[in-house]
Image (cartoon, rainbow, N blue to C red):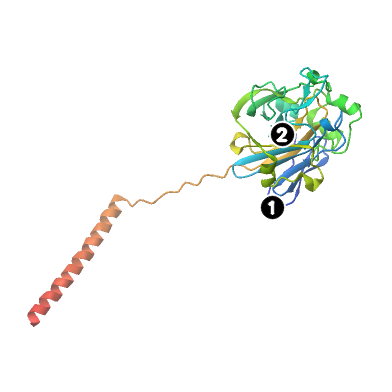
Amino acid sequence: MKLRNIATLMAGATATLCFISMTGQQANAGTIHKDWNYSIDAFNDGSGGSAYEIKGMAIKETSDSIFVALTGGTPLTGTYASGAADKNIGWGDLFFNFTDKTFKAASDANSLFGIRFAGTNDSIVSSTGVYKNVQAASVTATNDGYSSLKQYYDSGWNKQNTQGTDLATKTDAYAYFGEGSILNVIGSGTKVGDITMLTASALSAAGLDFSHFLASGDQTIGFQLNKSLLGFGDYVANMFLECGNDGVALAGAILPPAPVVAVTHQVPEPTGIAGMALVALAFVGSQLHKRFHEKVTLELDS
């Protein structure tokens, strides 16, 4: 998928980013507020009620870390659902796509990054953390969910900002995800590092403010990871609930690491050192000669 020159994120700036969908239409991208990039999801597209409603996602970049926050009605450990195989439906995994491909194409090429942040979900990988070379999988069938994105929309959930600010329409969502299976967990990949879960107070201290968009859900989940664990450049980040009842996407950019500037100290050449030594000796010699001459002159005068 072609991302369109997403603006460099300037600290403290408030700006709107944008990217072009495969259809050539321009979709509004997340908005910067207090150094966080936000994508606000529709408040009425959570099939099944408020427990399956996602209200927004936000991402913040610092010199060495990436902060991620999600808000909605689903607890980190999921919610009871009699139709699910394990009687629980929760959050799927978060994906980062740094390629110019659609989500499925990037997944088929094992080119995604994935983050499992909910330890009780049905992800195929065994532990929480950050994964590279990821291929996504679907667990909607075992979570009483939708067999395809098309089924979700055909069921009446085509709302404005359907996948958040950056995939605002059904057309945008189809262009990026396709109409088929909702791929919502990491199917395979290589773990490259861990994440640190953050409390509400830690997120607030970091500047998170969903209330600015009237988008604070009953549950807000956040975590932090080392920036070096992900790629850099333009990306689309997205996640779906395990059942596919709602999802959200966010377009942004991660700045490349600053170049390392080597500091060198000029060491004089040996000949230069020798020359400096000769100059020093000559100076000392001239001073001694001057003092000797002055002494002799004084003695003769006396």
Q: What residue is pinned by disc 2?
A: 100
Left or right relative to 64: residue 244: right
- Report the amino acid beneath label 1: Gly
Residue at 74% x, 51% y is: 14
Between 173 and 187, the residue placed more toward the observer is 187
Residue 98 position in % (x across, y down): 68, 34
Q: What residue is pinned by disc 1?
A: 12
Between 273 and 18, the residue placed more toward the observer is 18
In the rendered image, which quarter contains the N terminus? Answer: top right
Residue 13 position in % (x across, y down): 71, 52
Instruction: Name the quadrant containing residue 136.
Output: top right
Q: Is residue 109 visible?
A: no
Residue 127 position in % (x across, y down): 64, 24
Q: Nearer the viewer, mark 1 or mark 2?
A: 1
- Of the numbered discs 1 and 2, the one sitting upstream in the chain is 1
- Report the amino acid beneath label 2: Asp
Label 1 element class: loop
For the residues labelled 1 and 2, say whether their Cβ atoms are less than 8 Å apart.
Answer: no
Between 32 and 204, the residue placed more toward the observer is 204
Residue 124 position in % (x across, y down): 69, 20
Residue at 83% x, 39% y is: 25
Between 33 and 81, the residue placed more toward the observer is 81
